[in-house]
Image (cartoon, grey):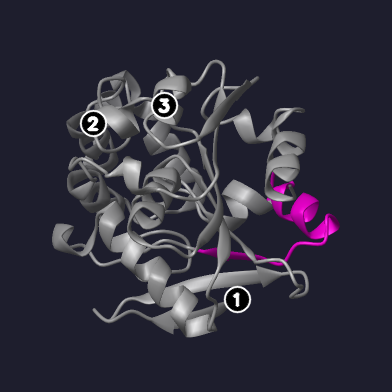
Amino acid sequence: MERFRTTDGISIAYRRWGDPSARPPVVLHHGFIVDAVTNFEAPGVVAALVGAGRYVIAPDARGHGASGKPHDTAAYGEERMARDLIQLLDHLGMREIDLVGYSMGAVVSAIFAANHDRVRRLVLSGVGAAVAELGGLDVRALPPSEVAAVLLTESRSAIESAPAVGFRTLADALGADRVALAAQVNAANRAPIPLERITAPTLVLAGADDPLAVRPQDLAAAIPGARWRVVSGDHTTTLGSPAYLPALLDFLNS
């Protein structure tokens, strides 16, 4: 694990796997609560990419994993995480990448690709129409106030009865900083993303039973030339779908 420091002083941890090659590196941006290892290494995504000859880089977003965890809401938001990503690439001296984002990381990736021409291929997973319609994750499925409340409460009965109990269970299982995570929830992007400015070939890859990735075809329609595909799985199991890795590798290596 390596680190760099952002312009606002946050330490960002990142990992690299495989060997540099003539093809652009694949940068993986994880989802909310988890980190690069949990989201991408554990389900075999990293191993599959390295096995296909790709060089892989994955940061832990601010507030997550081994990166710095400020408690100030002003330190968060997917737009700020996209700025962290450009600083990571500059730190590593990388001009062009293939970018894969999952859930929160897909919002970060869409913002990045809409504002920078450094993406050769873009994959957005764990998201659907809400990225185009709401500027981020689908708050219609789970309001941010409920997620923040279950992360911050110390009441066991409130946790057990909360619709967002799964977020608290995952945060506790990973030993996450729940105050930092709640700050990200409150800062999550709601501004329109200029998806029409994305020039990279794009694949929207969603789970059939993922309530946070409904109508992926509508997200694809908002991105010039994008394609979409549905595989089995819900928000926590899509990456383990038998069809996910073949679809990802076929798109990135085309």
Depth check: give the residue in front, 195 or 19.
Answer: 195
Gap between marks 3 and 2 measured at Cα:
15 Å
User: Residue sitting at 29 percent across and 22 percent down?
Assistant: 162
Quarter residue 137 falls in: top left
Q: Is residue 52 magenta?
A: yes
Query: Which residue type carries mark 2?
Result: Leu
* Residue 210 in picture, x, y percent from top left: 49, 21
**Which span is picked out in magenta?**
42-59
Residue 221 is tagged as: 3
Q: Is residue 139 left or right of residue 99?
A: left
Gap between marks 3 and 1 measured at Cα:
38 Å
Mark 3 vs mark 2: which is more N-terminal?
2
Q: Residues within 10 Å of mark 3 (few under 14, many from 20)?
A: some
Depth check: give the residue in front, 210 or 216.
Answer: 216
Residue that carries the numbered disc 1 in the rendered image: 1
State the count of labels: 3
Mark 3 vs mark 1: which is more N-terminal?
1
